[in-house]
Amino acid sequence: MLGKSAGGLYWMFRGLERAENTARLIEAGFRIALTRSSDPASDWRSIIVTAAQQTAYEARHDGYDSQRVTDFLLRDPANPSAVLSIIKQARDNARLVRTALTTEVWVAVNETWMLLTDLLKDPIPERDLPLVMEAIRHQSALVRGALYGTMLRNDIYDFCRLGTFIERADSTARIIDVKYHALLPSPSFVGSRLDNVQWEMILRSVSAHRSFRFAVQDEYNAANIAEFLILDRRFPRSLAFCAKRIEENLEQLSQEYGESGPSQEAARQFRARIKGRDIDAIFEEGLHEFVTQTIIELAALGSTIEEQYRFNK
């Protein structure tokens, strides 16, 4: 496959996943802000910081509130990382690789772009945020369903899935960091009722509330929930699950092309770092430090994949 086509597939699905995960990040902040009202500006600032968009946001705004933050993340035309911009880029990439996609996948992507273009044409009132976030997640699920149900399991599929799981792992790490590093009001709140309520909201924001109850059947607290989101190999948004799928898709590419390279090795190292840990060791290291290093390693792995498979050629 041409590197440019591989890159189009990879970035199309990174974009679709990023749009969904931006919605999840906004919902995490929105839900957590509902549990306290003393400093809402700090809550919304943490969303921007975790989305790695603080510099761009502060170049255009001088304060933080729900309307300005959500407008910037969802529909600001000057923000190339806004959901509306990301969906347009995903649709443009889908057009670029149209012949590699089934009709069902193309239609799902195109319909997503049309629906969200209409849905986000005006600023979203705070009361409507949950419904809009649900629509974004729903459209992303439709595209995934079309991919699962109609595409051959070949190199095209592997590049699509790589984009999804690298973006998803990055998002899960950032959503964990929103809670533990940015939103916790004070170290004295650790283990408190407020702390545990916020962790429960994090579970809900990644659609993990019921899965956690099925899998863990234990109380909501930082250790149990962080362990589930980082180390549980059964949950499709955990870091462990994503790391396994990234390694598997890269190994399938190595078999397809008859050679292994630096991205396969980097994926093995990334998975080994997560697979060989327990939550007590992660907390001893520092959850924020662990998550930060995870984000750095994922960015490096993404760059390695781009270079190895010549996305720009």
Image (spheres, rainbow, N blue to C red):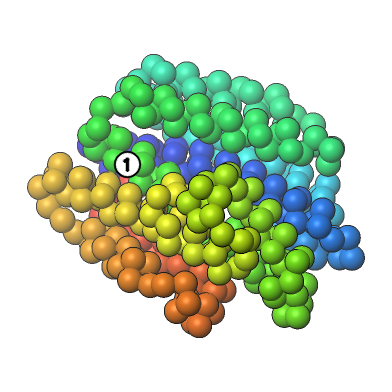
Label 1 residue SS: helix
Quadrant for the C terminus in the image = top left
Residue sitting at x 49%, y 22%: 108
**Residue most toward the bottom?**
284
Quadrant for the N terminus in the image = top left
Residue sitting at x 56%, y 59%: 218
Percent of width and height locating residue 237 = 47, 50
Percent of width and height locating residue 55 = 68, 63
32 or 174, which is in the foreground? 32
Relative height, residue 133 to residue 283 (above, below): above
**Residue most toward the right?**
38
Query: What's the amino acid at mark 1?
Result: Phe
Percent of width and height locating residue 36 = 84, 61
Residue 174 visible within the image: no
Residue sitting at x 45%, y 49%: 235
**Residue most toward the left?**
258
Relative height, residue 24 to residue 106 (above, below): below
Residue sitting at x 53%, y 33%: 140
Instruction: Please state if 39 lies on the left or on the right of 238 as rendered.
Output: right
236 or 173, which is in the foreground? 236
Judge the density around disc 1: few (<14), some (14-19), many (≥20) Cα neighbours within 10 Å: many
Instruction: Please state if 209 lies on the left or on the right of 269 as rendered.
Output: right
Residue placed under numbered mark 1 in the picture: 159
Residue 300 visible within the image: yes
Percent of width and height locating residue 296 = 46, 68
Instruction: Please state if 196 lies on the left or on the right of 292 as rendered.
Output: right
- Figure label count: 1
Relative height, residue 262 to residue 155 (above, below): below
